[in-house]
Structure formats: structure tokens, C-alpha cells
Image (cartoon, grey):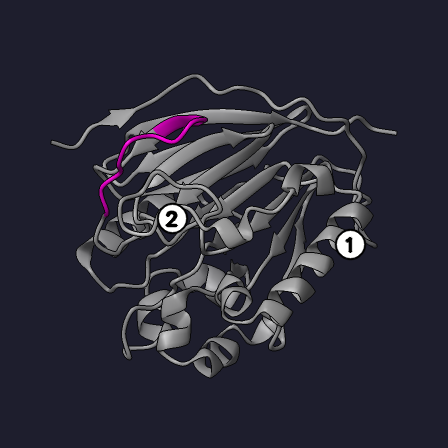
Amino acid sequence: MRSWVRVAAATVAISLTAVGTSPGAVSAAPAPVVIAVLGDFGSGAPAERQVARIVAAARPTDIVTTGDNVYSAAGYAALVGAYYPTWVAARRVFPATGNHDYAEGITAFDSYFSWLHGQRTYTRAMGQVAFFVLDSQAALDSPAERERQRAWLQRSLAASPARWRVVVLHHPPYSSGTVHGSTAALQWPYRAWGADLVLSGHEHNYERLDKGGVTYVVDGSGGQDLYRLGSPLAGSLARDDTDYGVLLLRPGDHALGAQFLTAAGRVVDRFSIPGRTRG
């Protein structure tokens, strides 16, 4: 029988720097930023519709995905655009690639997400949060590509002035899942490089872990069939394999707040990450 566990979040002690505003920014208080994170969602199944409704109700400014944006030849318009039309039209969907994106033809990914200009490893700033998106399938397929992405990530994190630095990739460095589990080849020194949060998918469930002072979240329950969790790894703080859902990120004055909301409207997990000290 499946069950879910929620444990109070451990905060991550980090120092803070400010992100500059864009040219033309006005002095009036900006609208609150809400970022929806979902993964393993492009199934076309009823569960994808349920998650899409939860996302729409949250009214996110942007959507970030942890990969497997499609699962069939139906394509991106049918499996992404039909469910998230507002954000696709506004070019506010920022996806990571997954193994199924490659299986269905990676050129279709490049064509549909044209605002990425063919880039699958890229940085996107959303207010005071910077996302560093990796192409983990390519990294696992090629040691040379893995080294290239590793060097790019280390360099990009070090150069970022963002208050919160978030790494996004499909294959989870750490997972208590029973189907794929952890990906040892991608267990990089994210904290030493300056990351605050590492988001992944691939395992179709939700899990939050603390490893070496970095928060890792597996967010792979966006619409495809769920996978069971196994015995928890050391550092596993919250887990859910009973329902589909979305992770909502809300950067505030002092902390990046997060909650995992299920399709049934249940908050399974809440946590926050303090911002870096303004210099």
C-alpha cells in the first residue's frame, strides 16, 4: 500500500547576492513570481489534464520542466501545447530534455521550443532565481559531452549573481525510486559550485532529499504512470508516490519558498531555502 511522508524542511545556510533588474524595469512593486516545475508529464492521459488544472489555478509566471515532455509520436503541440497553451504562446516554458524527448526525435524538441534557439543546455533567469538547465541524456551518452556540461555548469554557477541558483536535469543524482534510482555519473559537487537546489525527474514520483547541504527534489509525477518509492536513502526528507502533482516555487524577500501540490489539492511537502546575503 502506498503512503506519503512529510517531514519539516531543513534550511540550507548560504550567503546572498542580488540580481540586477532588467533595462526598463519600473519602480512599482512587481507582481509575485510563481514558478511551476513539473516533469514526466507529456502523456496525454487524464492525469496530465489534472495537473494542468492545478498549474493553471496557481497562475505561474513561468513553467520549468524536468524532462520527458512527450511520450508518443502525438508530438509537442498535442502533449504540451494543448495542456499549457498560455505559457507556450508566451514562450514561458523552459524545458529540460529527457530520454523520451530523444526517443521521439530530439529535432522535434528543438523545433517546438524554438525560443531556446536549439540550445538544450542553457541558463534562464526568472526574477531573482536563475535556472541552469542540463541535457542529461546527452551527458550520459557521451563522456566528452558530460565533461563539457560539467565545465559549463561549474563556470556558469560561479559567475551567477542570482540569489538562488537552481540546477535542472532529467536524471536524478539521488532518488529512492525503484525503477531508475540514483544516477551516480551526475552526482557532481553542486554545493561547492554554488547551487542551492537541484531539480530532476525520470522517477515518476516526488521526493526531497538533503545531500551535503544541497536540496535535491525529484519531481517526475506530472502525468505519466507513477512509480513506487523504495526504502528511503539517507537524507530523504519527504516522499510521495500516491498522486500526480506540481512543485511551486515562490521567491520572497528572504527565502525561496516551495510546496508540492498534488492533483487532488493536497500539499505533500513545504520547504524554503534562504537567499544569499546582499552585498
Q: Which of 10 and 274 is in front in this view?
A: 10
Say which element carries label 2: helix
Residue 273 at x, y percent in the picture: 60, 27
* Residue beneath the point at 36% across and 46% down: 181
Q: In this view, does 17 lie to the left or right of 10?
A: right
Residue 99 higher or lower than 11, as above or below? below
| Residue 233 among those drawn in magenta | yes
- For the N terminus, give its image quadrant: top left
Q: What is the chief secondary structure element of the magenta stretch? A: loop
Q: Is residue 52 left or right of residue 189?
A: left
Mark 1 surroundings: few (<14), some (14-19) or many (≥20) residues within 10 A: few
* Residue beneath the point at 48% across and 83% down: 107
Residue 116 at x, y percent in the picture: 60, 71
Q: In this view, does 124 lie to the left or right of 84?
A: right
Residue 212 at x, y percent in the picture: 59, 29
Q: Nearer the viewer, residue 211 or 19?
A: 211
Which amino acid does the dot numbered 1 rest on?
Answer: Arg
Q: Nearer the viewer, mark 1 or mark 2?
A: 1
Residue 95 at x, y percent in the picture: 50, 61
* Count of all numbered marks drawn on residues in the image: 2
Please give the residue where the numbered disc 1 appears in the rendered image. Answer: 155
* Residue beneath the point at 28% across and 79% down: 73
Please give the residue where the numbered disc 2 appears in the rendered image. Answer: 56
Image quarter of residue 80:
bottom left
> Can residue 258 be seen in the rendering of this structure?
no
Residue 277 higher or lower than 80, as above or below? above
Q: Nearer the viewer, residue 241 or 59?
A: 241
> What number is the disc on residue 202?
none
